[in-house]
Amino acid sequence: MREILGRRRKISLRRKERTAFLDAALTYAEQWQWRVVPGVGLDGRAARRAAGTPACGCGRPNCPVPGAHPVEPGLLAATRDPRMVRWWWTSRPDAPVVLATGDRVSAASLPATAGARALGAMETLGCRLGPVVATPTRYVFLVAPYSLAELGELLDSQDWVPTSLRYHGDGGYVALPPAGGASGPLAWVRPPVVPAGERTPWLPRIDALVDALVRAGRTAPDGDRLRY
C-alpha cells in the first residue's frame, strides 16, 4: 500500500508542476490580454547525448534560442483566447510560454551581465521599472509597445548603439516564466505588478530605459547572433 501511495503522490506532484505552465499562460492571455503561444521546448534525450548541452526540440543543432521559440503552431497563431490556451497546454503541459511582442507589450534585452548592470543603475536612479525576466544568457525588460519610428528616433540620438542590445517589438517574441522542465531556467528578476484598480501590469515606456540600456550594452560583448 505504501508503494501505491508513493506512486500516486509522485504522479500528483508531477501534475501539479505541469499546471504551472497552463496557469501562467492563462494569466498572461486571459487576465492581462498578452498574446501567447507554446514554445518548442528542449529535447532531453539529445541533451544527454551531447553531455548535457541544451538541445532544441526543433532539431536544429545550432538553434540560437533552444527551447524558447514557437514552431507548431507558429508565432502568427499567438492568441489571448483562453479556450485555445487551455487546448494547447492540455496537449503539451510542459511547453514553455512564449509571448508575442508588439501588441500590448514589447521588450528590450541585453546580455545577462550588462542587463544586471543596467537594472542596478536604473534602480539607483530611482527609475520606475516594469517586469524584468532573466533567461540563461540575457535580461529581458518588458515595456509598453513602441513603433519602429519611435525607436528609430531614440536610437538616432545615441552616439553608438551596441548590437548586443535587442529590441522585441512587432513580430518579435520572448519566453516568460515559469521555469523548469522544457523551458530551462527562467525567472522574474522583477515580477509584474498590477496597480490597484487596473487589470494589467504596469509597463514603462522604452524612452525611459533606452539610455541606461545603451550605456550598459556598451560594456557587453558585441555580436550579431540572437541569444536566449
Image: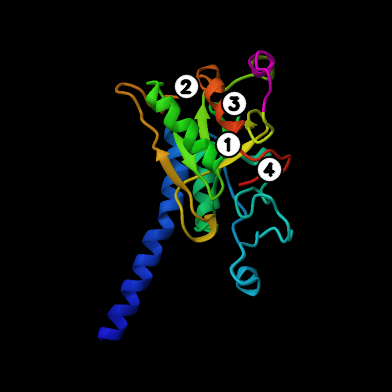
In space, the residues marked 2 and 1 are separated at their CA atoms by 17 Å
- Please name which of the two marks, 4 or 1, marks the residue nearer to the observer: 1
In space, the residues marked 3 and 1 are separated at their CA atoms by 9 Å
In space, the residues marked 4 and 1 are separated at their CA atoms by 10 Å
Dot 3 or dot 2: first in sequence order is 2
Whether residue 53 is situated above or below residue 142 in the rendered picture: below
Whether residue 46 is situated above or below residue 174 in the rendered picture: below
Q: The magenta stretch spans which residues?
A: 151-161
Dot 3 or dot 1: first in sequence order is 1
Residue that carries the numbered disc 4 in the rendered image: 226
Q: Amino acid at mark 2?
A: Pro
For mark 2, give the secondary structure.
loop
Q: Quadrant of residue 35?
A: top right
- Please name which of the two marks, 2 or 4, marks the residue nearer to the observer: 4
Q: Quadrant of residue 3?
A: bottom left
Quadrant of the rendering where the N terminus is positioned: bottom left
For mark 3, give the secondary structure.
helix
Q: Amino acid at mark 3?
A: Val
Q: Which mark is residue 204?
A: 2
Dot 2 or dot 4: first in sequence order is 2
- Please name which of the two marks, 3 or 2, marks the residue nearer to the observer: 3
Instruction: Tell whether 22 sits left or right of 45.
Output: left
